[in-house]
Image (tube, rainbow, N blue to C red):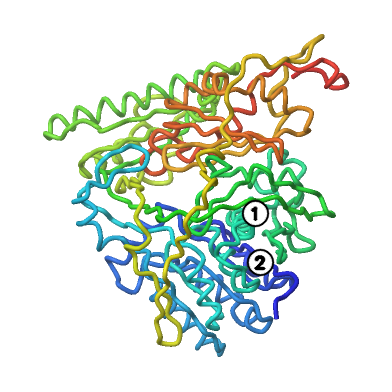
Amino acid sequence: MTKHMIAIGGASGFWGDSMTGATQLVASGKIDYLVFDYLAELTMSLLASAKLKNQEMGYATDFVSIAMKAVLQDAKARGIRVIANAGGVNPRACATALQALANELGVAIKIAVVEGDDVLPLLPALRAEDVRDMQSGKALPEKILSANAYLGALPIKLALDAGADVVITGRCVDSAVTLGALLHEFHWSMDDYDKLAAASLAGHIIECGCQGVGGLHTDWENVPDWAHSGYPIVECLQDGSFIVTKPDGTGGLVTPATVGEQLLYEIGDPARYILPDVICDFTQVRLTQAAEHRVLVEGVKGYAAPSSYKVSATYADGFRSAAQLTVVGVDAERKVRRTAEAILARTREIFTRLGLPDYSATHIEVLGTAAAYGAHIARAPLFEAVMWLAVSHTHKQALEIFSREIAPAGTSWSPGTTGAGGGRPGVSPAIKQFAFLIDKQRLSVSFSLRGETAQVEPITVPIPRGSDLSLSSSMVVEENNTQLPQGDQITVPLIRLAYARSGDKGDISNIGVMARRAEYLPLLRAQLTVTSVAAYLAQLVQGKVTRYALPGIHAFNFVCEQALGGGGMASLRHDPLGKGMAQILLAMPLQVPADWFADEGAT
């Protein structure tokens, strides 16, 4: 019998999230499913390296040793089923470890394992076919550490159909753990696109843990009780609509603003958010405050799934290291810069004597100077500054020399130098990402349960005539004839008019901007253009800026290319994931009618 409502709790946004998420959600008594997301691109390469050293490793060990150890007995007693992509590159080992824990605790559980995302065996053929990176167009590197396809929700659904209490996957799209549960519970058809898209949005809202219920909110001071932040719950209905909420008595905040910020996080074109099971259109989503800490989400549209999977491969491109020192006193910024330059000059001379090549790249930042804002804000003299000196090199030996030459600054150069007490900076492989598409038919996806393995055939549905998705892009055509409000004007920062959140995909940063009031949208449309945003962020963004509209939530999404210095581990920036990009844009000055903020004045 189909239940009227299914509640799913998101217990983890990444490997390293708080141990409180799972226990809080299970103890709430409000959920039917507990889902976990562990796998960032870098995580996969780290897990691949761990498996090379020990064939019993290669999965997110915290899932078993911390999360499940704390809640497995209670979850089983309450009938809560668990879905996690904790399997990494070794889901069978993860399942074996969980079964051992269950035996130790005296809990009888049925564990299913989803496999088939590993693309490494296909790399020779793909290299012969001259597969190219989706962003850069570069050829496939010679030595790949990991290569995994983002699988969808269907194998999870089938494993639940077969009776699994716990489903462990390797790489899948983050939202698949939620969609898989709802496919099982509501018996939706795989061509019920609007419902599949709605469930995928529900998964997107909870996939980053606390971020979906007040974490990282623009108006952070309005979010209570950070120490007891709530983890997100989605209460999903058969028709695809859902409520976003959190456990009673926890911190956090659930409003259309906090949910809207998470909707905008790490998306591209909101009319074509492409997943393995469905292509989602978020442009007409509606967010309604249903009650305190309860937001109703409606209006998601869906289209037929693509015929390919996205593959994320990782490879090592030399080595990297990053050092920090603090300098206290007058002219702290100048002292920091001179210190960093001296370290580079000294180590380069050592490299020359030893016959080592120069650095592949270097990057100096003085933290605390707001350098990322460029010339847009006035800077007061600093009496305390932190050096960020990041470097990359083809030879590990060279960076070991660099690492040894940081601490001597404490007795050699600037007065007031401190902060090197944490030891020498580490040297690690510089992990980079290579993304491409692969036809679904080339992968053999399966799930195993109780010693039996079942193949999962990919769903490929022809796109109906007249539904050409190239016509549904929400990209905004820039217009020069928009009429601004007349009369007296004042200058205010964007944060007075909008909320914002930024995310990353490789070297692309997306900045979602959501109007605080619907009546602000025309002014934002007129002044927050591709040209003005590109100019304001020119010190950071080297590539193209595209603006997309989400009229349902009065928002825009700006997709900024070549924005993160390579992004992820490829970047030497202090903020390689672009977490601060939205904060920088929120300082952008706009002209507004004086009477909009008559009681407050300009800032």
* Dot 1: element: helix
Give the x, y percent position of residue 374: 52, 20
Residue 201 in sight here: yes
Mark 2 Cα shell of 10 Å, populated few (<14), some (14-19), many (≥20): many
Q: Is residue 79 above or below residue 460?
A: below
Give the x, y percent position of residue 458: 43, 66
Most extreme residue toward the front, as rendered? Answer: 465
Q: Amino acid at mark 2?
A: Ile
Mark 1 Cα shell of 10 Å, populated few (<14), some (14-19), many (≥20): many
Residue shown at 31% from the left, 24% from the top: 342
Residue shown at 51% from the left, 59% from the top: 277
According to the image, label 2 marks what residue?
8
Give the x, y percent position of residue 598: 86, 19
Q: Amino acid at mark 1?
A: Cys
Viewer-closest of 371 and 467: 467
Most extreme residue toward the top, as rendered? Answer: 487
Q: Is residue 48 above or below residue 220?
A: below
Answer with the quarter of the image where residue 169 lies: bottom left
According to the image, label 1 marks what residue?
210
Residue shown at 27% from the left, 66% from the top: 53
* Dot 2: element: strand
Answer with the quarter of the image where residue 6 lies: bottom right
Viewer-closest of 37 and 51: 37
Q: Is residue 212 above or below residue 170?
A: above
Residue 209 in sight here: no
Give the x, y percent position of residue 201: 62, 54
Report the Cα–Cα distance between label 1 and label 2. Answer: 14 Å
Residue 540 is left or right of residue 525, and the answer is left
**Quadrant location, the N terminus:** bottom right
Answer with the quarter of the image where residue 3 lies: bottom right
